[in-house]
Structures are given as structure tokens and as C-alpha cells.
Image (tube, grey):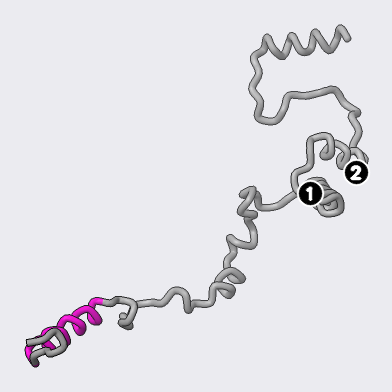
Amino acid sequence: MTTDETTPEETADEAKVSAAAAANERRKRNIPVAVDRRRQNAAEKRRTSERRRLIDPTTCERDYSDDETLFMKAMERYKRENRRPFPTWSEVLEVLISLGYRKVADEEDLPGAKKDAAVKDAAKDAAAKS
């Protein structure tokens, strides 16, 4: 028997192997799923979701005060006009000054900062001496 000749038994065995390989190929099969979540209208869900409208996901805040909104809009305008996606603190201060903010009161503790009484007293004494 030469290599070009095959018996009917060998041909049947090869057919079984290729059929088994095709049956195991998952990409070729259409397997039904219970719910195809991709077909649901995601845009509709976003529009009707109460949480999505009220909470800013970047800050987890519900509403901004008028001053906060004014400052954010001014910063966005500054960044866009000057092509500065990450402005320096000096530039932030320039934007604040351009909005009309001036230092008119004495310094206070930073929000959320916890200082010892001794540190507070030392800072007050230093401010009084200067």
C-alpha cells in the first residue's frame, strides 16, 4: 500500500476526528443564553436612572454651590484657552484672582485638618509678632 492510497476505514476515522474537532470548536456553535444583556438599551437605562443624574461619579457630590460652579467653569476655560490640562498652583491662584477673590480675613484652619493646641498657639503667636 502506498501513502497516496487510503482505505475506507481510514477515511471514516479521519471524518470522525474532524467531526469531533468541529463539534468542540465553540466559536462555530450558536449557544443560546438566557438574557443577552448587550441587547438591552443601555442609553435608556442611563436616562431613567435617578442616581446617574444626581451624583457626579468623579466627586460623589450631589450639587455644587454657585461659587464652586463658577470656579470650575473658569478653570475649564483657562485650561482650554491656554492648552494646559494640568495647571500649576500659581495658575490656579491667577484664575482665582481673576474671579475677584482677595485675601480679606485672617487665616483659619484648613478644612479637615487636625492640629494640636500647641501648634495652633505657636502659629497665632507667630502671626501676632509679625
Quarter holding the N terminus is bottom left
Of 13 and 109, nearer the camera is 13
The image shows residue 46 at horizontal and vertical percentages of: 58, 69
Of 19 and 73, nearer the camera is 19
Residue 23 appears left or right of 86: left
- Secondary structure beneath dot 1 equals helix
Residue 99: within the magenta?
Answer: no
Quarter holding the C terminus is top right
Which residue is denoted by mark 2 in the rendering? 99
Res 10 seen here? yes
Write the start and end of the magenta stretch as one range. 8-24
Q: Residue at x 84, y 39 (%)?
A: 91
Q: Residue at x 78, y 46 (%)?
A: 68
Q: Residue at x 20, y 84 (%)?
A: 19
Which residue is denoted by mark 1 in the rendering? 72
Of 22 and 64, nearer the camera is 22
The image shows residue 128 at horizontal and vertical percentages of: 85, 10
Image quarter for residue 4?
A: bottom left
Asked if residue 104 is positioned above or below residue 123 in the image, the reply reads: below
